[in-house]
Amino acid sequence: MTSRFKRAFLGLSALGMIAAAAAITSPAQAATCTTTTKIALAGQSAAVGAVPFNVAIANDIDAKYCIDLSVVEVVSGAQTLAALVGGTAQVTVGTVDNFMGWNATAAMTVFREVQTAPFFDVVVRKDFYEANLKGKKFADQMKALAGAKLGITALGGASEATWRQLLTGAGASLTGTLVAGQLNAATIGASFTAKAIDATITWEPNTTLLTEGLTDGAEPLATMAFSIKEPTKDMPAETNTPGLTLGGTSAWVAANMEVAKNIDAMFDESIAYAKNPKNFAKVVALIQEKSKISNKTAISLAKRYLNYFNVSGTINREAWDITGPWYFANLPAVVKNKSYTSNDFVYDLSLRQIKPLKVKASYDSVSLAKNLNLAVRNGSTISITTSTPKVCTVGKTSVTGKAAGTCDITVTVTDKKAVGQQATTRFARTFLVIKK
């Protein structure tokens, strides 16, 4: 089955982006289903980032793409990883930080972007803000927060990493205390009231509830000194990463590519539905139902938050390439001392697909590069690498099928100098099916 959108997107390199040559065309009809695949997605239905899959289930959009979607409820990255590795969930939405950390346990592949803006934001207890942060520049605010009691979801997770990114980006070092277990608005609210934490990193709807009131008419418990979702130039680049990406273990993605394409198409339609003004009231009602918040708060949140969803699914690989080296330098234990780039994780389903290759047959490197929309010029150097040598063999000028399966390859084109908008080095990753 094909994706709802016929798309082509040029590969991105670690040094920059190649200009896109093809736009989204008119929607294609979903294929008639002969079978339906049950897919469990590890996530939090109550989080506003869950809007795309909640919409898909509520409106039977999953069924249009031959999927029977359900949600395995998780509250932390550790639970998500356990679900993926254990097979109780096939896919999940996670941050860049999540997937890099999980990769040490099982190879991960991300195939679409769900949310363009960062997942987390910082809320600060009102009296702490008034006494220590009000009127100060970002760097001075972070120096004040460096010695504070900072809330996180779990030690070693993405929320801790984000705090450390913010602090080191402002030239500060953590001297305060990290307080784990800040999982929902009620818990965070109780921690603020008891002054057990001074600030926390959390997600929606927690952010809105804490800054507007846990219930209608209640006094706000926190304020936002700045927004990671709308960063200023003095904030560290590492935090400005896609808020949620969609992926699973590399083994599952490679073995279920057609299903992954259908999930990608389902998200396209779900996000388009959610962002359509005609459906606003229905989406607000769904947020209200899942997040257990008032209609007033749901409206306020939806007006702001729906803007952050990615309707095309195209992945911001440059953001991954900034984050990987930061982890290697600052939290090497999380990534097991590896410096990752997007090349290690990202398989953007909007990339052009290559026709299957038979065992013992070959594709030459020039043809592969051109099929992946990588410009090849006189003097260009082309290299091919693979993480699946049992399935395919790569040489200096070609890739050859070795055994039936899925060949995971990356084609890199390098020039002596940049031309126009194209970087000197550019690459694209693809899964090449090998048939007997």
Image: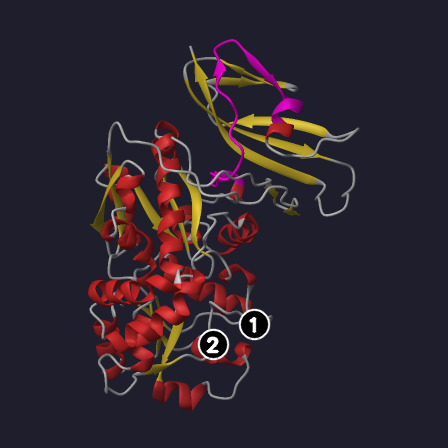
Residue 180 visible in this rendered orientation of the protein: no
Disc 1 target residue:
232
Image point 35% across, 69% down: which residue?
A: 302
- In the rendered structure, find residue 226 and report the number of the disc placed on it: 2
Q: Is residue 262 magenta?
A: no
- Magenta residue span: 343-368
Type of amino acid at the residue the image marks with label 1: Thr
Q: Secondary structure at mark 2?
A: loop
Considering depth in this image, is 300 or 394 the residue closer to the camera?
300
Where does residue 30 sit, x and y in percent of width and height? 36, 37
Q: Quadrant of residue 83?
A: top left
Image point 33% across, 54% down: which residue?
A: 52
Residue 434 visible in this rendered orientation of the protein: yes
Type of amino acid at the residue the image marks with label 2: Phe
On the picture, is 156 further left or further right than 373?
Answer: left
Label 2 near label 1: C-beta < 8 Å? yes
Q: Secondary structure at mark 1?
A: loop
